[in-house]
Amino acid sequence: MTVIVWDGKILAADSRMTEGSFLVTDNDQKLFILDPAIEYKGDELLACALAGSSTDNEFILEHICGHDFPSKISHKASGIFIGKKNGYSLENDTTYLIPFSRNTKLAEGSGCQFAYSAMKLGLNAIEAAKHACKLDMACGGKIRCKEL
């Protein structure tokens, strides 16, 4: 699984990929800069981080970059998208992005409870992701981040 964290300024994600109880890699790309920005309901999506299989993540990115998202797609991914105006959450098998205020703290993935708790205690997104990696064996690798 993974941990994705947004603290209102920084989007962070780990880089561990697991399959069942197997460690596949500690160098998976889960954080994506959308350049050029993607127009979405009057906002511009700047970056996203996705928790799911690489296949589902690629499928979602393909649809977003093709400007045909949301569409009726089936997926087992969750994620956080950051736009210029709002943030957006993607839940498993949803065909739309759920808007939230950019200053909302949010975490997704198997390590989300650890990361969210760490942010409640004052840690930033990077520190919260590192904390989750210490406690959730499905999280790990390098923490990638982007200040937005």
Image (cartoon, grey):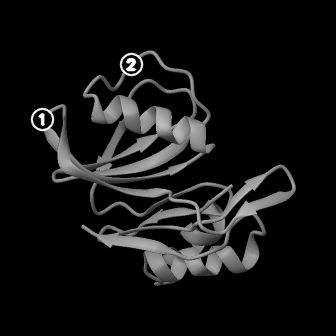
- Within 10 Å of disc 2 (Cα), the crowding (few <14, some 14-19, many 20+) is few
Q: Nearer the viewer, residue 50 or 106?
A: 50
Among the 4 quarters of the image, the one containing residue 95: top left
Rendered position, 25 above or below 81: below
Q: Are marks 1 and 2 in contact (CB under 8 Å)?
A: no
| Disc 2 secondary structure class | loop
Q: Nearer the viewer, residue 30 or 132?
A: 30
Among the 4 quarters of the image, the one containing residue 129: bottom right
Rendered position, 117 above or below 123: above
| Alpha carbon separation for disc pair 1 and 2 | 17 Å
* Residue 106, horizontal then vertical, whole percent: 46, 59
Q: Which residue is mark 1?
A: 42
Q: Nearer the viewer, mark 1 or mark 2?
A: 2
The residue at 66%/69% (across/down) is: 26
Residue 37 placement, left or right of 53 = left
Q: Nearer the viewer, residue 64 or 78?
A: 64
Q: Nearer the viewer, residue 132 or 77?
A: 77
Q: Quadrant of the N terminus?
A: bottom right
- Within 10 Å of disc 1 (Cα), the crowding (few <14, some 14-19, many 20+) is few
* Residue 128, horizontal then vertical, whole percent: 54, 77
Task: Name the amino acid, label 1.
Answer: Gly
Task: Name the amino acid, label 2.
Answer: Ser
* Residue 78, horizontal then vertical, whole percent: 53, 43
| Disc 1 secondary structure class | loop
Q: Residue furthest toward the top?
A: 72
Rendered position, 20 above or below 14: above
Q: Earlier in the sequence, mark 1 or mark 2?
A: 1
Q: Which residue is mark 2?
A: 71
The residue at 38%/69% (across/down) is: 7
Q: Quadrant of the C terminus?
A: bottom left
